[in-house]
Image: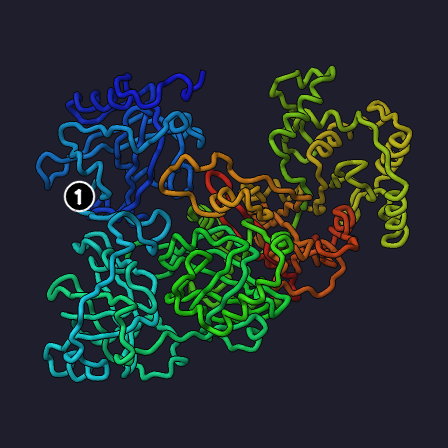
């Protein structure tokens, strides 16, 4: 009986292991408790805040991680908020400790606040993470209704309130970035004022420079907001400011435009209530010299004078600024306030715009990438991450979509809910022109996002290009657009340049060239969903073609089908796996299904035989490659080993050729017996056929492998690397899967890691460093169809579908069109493998896309490969 069925749901009279354990903790004199049996609990919330300034030793620990975490945990009967020891932060960084996961607490302590009488908190010192599908939470009807444990020294209000346990902090930050508002302290809505204003005493923006120079108190201002920036958090350890936030607005009256800055406590109170188009009546503001080292929106299209030497400052004190939001119905045209102006761009116009020009766009979303993170490169203050995602949107003016790199804009309710089939408006996007790629748009600090459900009342709804777009959408069929809609998976743009040039020495290089030692450090330093693109030098020494893992149910059915025979290795219902060693001195774990592969009857269709014979006779000389023309249907894969290789890395062993021909003839007769094969090859064939793989190795790799000091093998292609077709019925699940892990558990939170995805297979590439001391495995998943979102903007110059040309271009030639009735013939993996020998001894530069997906999954994908003639 599981936990869910063995406990009544919210009966407080039950014995609570959590409460009992805490009572044991308080009874100890040392205020530390080791729990050998482990305390089972589930994580309800994860909340992050800036760490306190503490001892010198603790400060050294916080140099690379300036944040602390509070957890709300429950045993299904009671709940409590605890602090996580700083040494366990890495579990959150790797997305191992998440909301909805079961944990076992093996050590905890009680920490008194030395600057406050009678106050402290529980700290989790050691924990073990278990199932991400918590039985404890599944047994609770309403987690929020569970009583909170309070004891002497633990304040009830501190546990119930939305503030950190470390009392020097007054608010939490978003779990994955510092941009998004987090917690109930951020006021979203407030009624507008219907007061009658005396506008006879107001001053104009053009007069403020005189006020600043003369130091006299200025009169009130009446302005309209034209642009709004995302939030900026500038908190540092030891800082005494309780709410270190800042936000810029561009405001205007009849005389011109000026920047307005919202400071500190006023940000939680006002930031989400002040929007583009809002009219403000401002009193008790101050003026200061403008801060020049910041981004500014492009406002030439407003055709107004810009006063950029000073800024309007709204402060919570000294003096306390007074803000009044004027209801739209009370705004008079006699005030002469300018209307918000836009500069919407169609996709057909994008090609002709210069780099870094600002524009606004509207489109119908067809692809939404997963949310990823990138670390800010600033040197001062605590580390900071940006959240971003790639989006495709069409507007009917071009066959190409808008390619949008959208960073979080302090609008999490919109950013996290962008999905296909929605109308997306992005304001103040910047044009990016890169060599060899279609132009794309990236968001700026002033970008605003709006999706279906948020358009009502926005100033842009009357724009002519917006109206034209709406008319176009009425001519589109939902079913047709839905067929082309995709969610999630690996996506990175732009593609590598045609020629790889030596990057600059500083950190500003878009694709830094790193040594293998540094590559290892970079991989280890990356946090959950943090994407990084790096370049390395070396040579490709081995290639495998692998089938993607099957679904759990199909594997189970196959295992049962295999174990139904008389094989001793795989008994019905067992998890036995055969371990076999091949001649390359590596040990592989082989599923029982591998044993079945050689015993089943194999028949090659006449059509398939004809294709293979044509490939033999036309593409390659029969006397050289006849032993290699093997299909996955015949030998699910074939390993080319060192013995018998010629100088091109291809086996010329006549014995193996005869074995292959003999096996093929017997397969056609439907009577394959293991005894008829060369016994030295049986184990290898079993392993390879069971794994459905092809293998090529360079002549020197078996020897070089012995001399390699370290082989980084953890990278690969995962289910999360693959995009999915968008389905309305699975919308919530797909959004949750493509977003970052939530900071609060909800009953709707799916327990599945990801929706199922279909993948024909991928290449696992082994790259040996230029100094032959280290090697790394990276996955290569070529674009094969126009339906793949990665095909957008991809240079599609024809190539010969050799292994090297596929790695250099990133796609199979020609790309197939899912919408076309005619079938495009793409090369089989076997055909591509026949050209792998050209990789041997070729000096290359390889661009890698690296992204930890959580836990031990580290996605390492090849973006582009350059041979010696393609880099300088």
Residue 857's spot in the image, x, y percent? Answer: 51, 41
Q: Is residue 779 left or right of residue 70?
A: right
Q: How is the image coloured?
A: rainbow
**Residue visible at 80% across and 25% down in the picture:** 599
> Which residue is at the far left?
117
- The answer to whether any part of residue 778 appears in the image is no
Nearer the observer, 79 or 779? 79
Q: Which residue is mark 1?
A: 167
Q: How many marks?
A: 1
Residue 698's spot in the image, x, y percent? Answer: 70, 47
Work out whether 36 lies above or below 175.
Answer: above
Q: Hey, which quadrant is residue 303 in on the image?
A: bottom left
**Residue visible at 24% across and 65% down in the picture:** 325
Residue 553's spot in the image, x, y percent? Answer: 62, 29
Q: Is residue 50 left or right of residue 645?
A: left
**Residue visible at 66% across and 53% down in the picture:** 782
Quarter of the image containing the N terminus? top left
Q: Hey, which quadrant is residue 868 in on the image?
A: bottom right
Work out whether 235 lies above or below 742.
Answer: below
Nearer the observer, 333 or 63? 333
Quarter of the image containing the C terminus? bottom right
- Check disc 1: other Cα within 10 Å, few if <14, some if 14-19, many if 20+: some
Q: Secondary structure at mark 1?
A: loop
- The answer to whether any part of residue 336 appears in the image is yes
Q: Is residue 83 left or right of residue 809?
A: left
Q: Is residue 834 left or right of residue 376?
A: right
């Amino acid at each position: 009986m599981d936990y869910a069925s063995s406990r009544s749901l919210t009966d407080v009279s039950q014995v609570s292991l959590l409460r009992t354990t805490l009572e044991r903790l308080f009874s100890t004199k040392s205020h530390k408790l080791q729990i050998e049996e482990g305390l089972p609990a589930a994580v309800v919330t994860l909340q992050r805040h800036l760490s306190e300034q503490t001892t010198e030793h603790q400060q050294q620990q916080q140099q690379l991680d300036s944040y602390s975490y509070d957890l709300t945990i429950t045993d299904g009967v009671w709940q409590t908020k605890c602090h996580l020891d700083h040494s366990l932060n890495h579990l959150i960084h790797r997305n191992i400790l998440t909301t909805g996961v079961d944990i076992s607490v093996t050590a905890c302590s009680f920490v008194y606040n030395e600057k406050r009488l009678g106050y402290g908190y529980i700290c989790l010192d050691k924990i073990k993470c278990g199932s991400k599908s918590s039985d404890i939470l599944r047994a609770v009807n309403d987690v929020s209704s569970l009583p909170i444990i309070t004891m002497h020294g633990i304040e009830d209000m501190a546990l119930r309130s939305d503030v950190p346990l470390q009392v020097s902090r007054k608010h939490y930050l978003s779990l994955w970035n510092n941009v998004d508002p987090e917690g109930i302290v951020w006021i979203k809505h407030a009624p507008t004022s219907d007061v009658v204003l005396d506008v006879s005493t107001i001053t104009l923006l053009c007069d403020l420079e005189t006020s600043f120079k003369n130091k006299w108190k200025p009169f009130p201002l009446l302005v309209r907001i034209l642009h709004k920036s995302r939030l900026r958090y500038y908190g540092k350890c030891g800082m005494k400011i309780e709410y270190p936030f800042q936000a810029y607005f561009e405001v205007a009256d009849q005389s011109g435009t000026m920047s307005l800055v919202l400071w500190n406590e006023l940000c939680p109170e006002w930031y989400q209530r002040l929007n583009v188009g809002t009219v403000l009546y401002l009193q008790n503001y101050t003026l200061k010299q403008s801060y020049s080292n910041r981004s500014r929106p492009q406002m030439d299209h407003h055709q107004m004078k810009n006063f950029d030497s000073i800024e309007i400052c709204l402060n919570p004190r000294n003096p306390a600024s007074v803000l009044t939001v004027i209801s739209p119905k009370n705004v008079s045209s006699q005030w002469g306030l300018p209307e918000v102006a836009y500069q919407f761009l169609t996709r057909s116009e994008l090609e002709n715009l210069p780099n870094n020009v600002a524009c606004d766009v509207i489109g119908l979303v067809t692809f939404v990438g997963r949310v990823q993170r990138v670390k800010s490169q600033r040197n001062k203050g605590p580390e900071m991450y940006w959240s971003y995602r790639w989006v495709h949107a069409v507007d009917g003016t071009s066959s190409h979509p808008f390619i949008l790199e959208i960073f979080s804009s302090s609008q999490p309710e919109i950013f996290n809910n962008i999905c296909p089939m929605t109308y997306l408006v992005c304001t103040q996007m910047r044009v990016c022109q890169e060599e060899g790629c279609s132009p794309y748009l990236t968001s700026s600090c002033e970008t605003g996002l709006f999706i279906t459900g948020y358009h009502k009342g926005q100033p842009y709804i009357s724009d002519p290009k917006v109206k034209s777009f709406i008319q176009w959408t009425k001519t589109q069929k939902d079913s047709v657009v839905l067929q082309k809609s995709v969610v999630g998976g690996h996506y990175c743009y732009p593609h590598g340049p045609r020629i790889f040039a030596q990057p600059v020495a500083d950190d500003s290089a878009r694709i830094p060239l790193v040594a293998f030692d540094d590559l290892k450090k970079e991989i280890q330093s990356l946090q959950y969903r943090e994407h990084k693109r790096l370049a390395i030098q070396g040579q490709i020494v081995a290639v495998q073609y692998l089938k993607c893992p099957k679904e759990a149910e199909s594997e189970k059915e196959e295992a049962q089908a295999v174990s139904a025979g008389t094989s001793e290795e795989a008994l019905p219902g067992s998890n036995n796996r055969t371990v076999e060693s091949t001649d390359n001195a590596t040990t592989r774990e082989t599923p029982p299904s591998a044993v079945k592969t050689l015993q089943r009857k194999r028949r090659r269709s006449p059509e398939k035989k004809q294709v293979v014979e044509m490939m033999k006779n036309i593409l390659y000389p029969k006397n050289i490659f006849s032993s290699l023309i093997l299909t996955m249907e015949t030998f699910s894969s074939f390993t080319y080993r060192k013995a018998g290789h010629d100088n091109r890395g291809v086996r010329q062993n006549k014995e193996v050729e005869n074995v292959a021909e003999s096996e093929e003839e017997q397969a056609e007769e439907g009577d394959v017996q293991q005894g008829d094969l060369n016994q030295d090859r049986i184990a290898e064939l079993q392993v390879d056929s069971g794994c459905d793989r092809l293998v090529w190795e360079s002549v020197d790799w078996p020897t070089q492998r012995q001399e390699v000091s370290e082989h980084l093998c953890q990278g690969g292609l995962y289910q999360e690397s693959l995009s999915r077709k968008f389905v309305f019925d699975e919308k919530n699940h797909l959004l949750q899967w493509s977003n970052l892990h939530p900071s609060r558990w909800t009953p709707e939170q799916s327990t599945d890691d990801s929706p199922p995805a279909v993948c024909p297979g991928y290449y696992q590439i082994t790259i040996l460093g230029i100094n032959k001391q280290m090697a790394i495995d990276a996955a290569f998943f070529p674009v094969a169809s126009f339906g793949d979102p990665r095909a957008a903007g991809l240079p599609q110059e024809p190539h010969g579908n050799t292994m090297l040309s596929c790695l250099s271009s990133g796609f199979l030639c020609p790309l197939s069109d899912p919408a076309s009735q005619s079938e495009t013939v793409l090369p089989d993996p076997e055909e591509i493998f026949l050209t792998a020998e050209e990789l041997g001894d070729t000096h290359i530069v390889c661009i890698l896309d690296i992204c930890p997906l959580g836990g031990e999954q580290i996605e390492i994908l090849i973006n582009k490969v350059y041979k010696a003639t393609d880099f300088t």
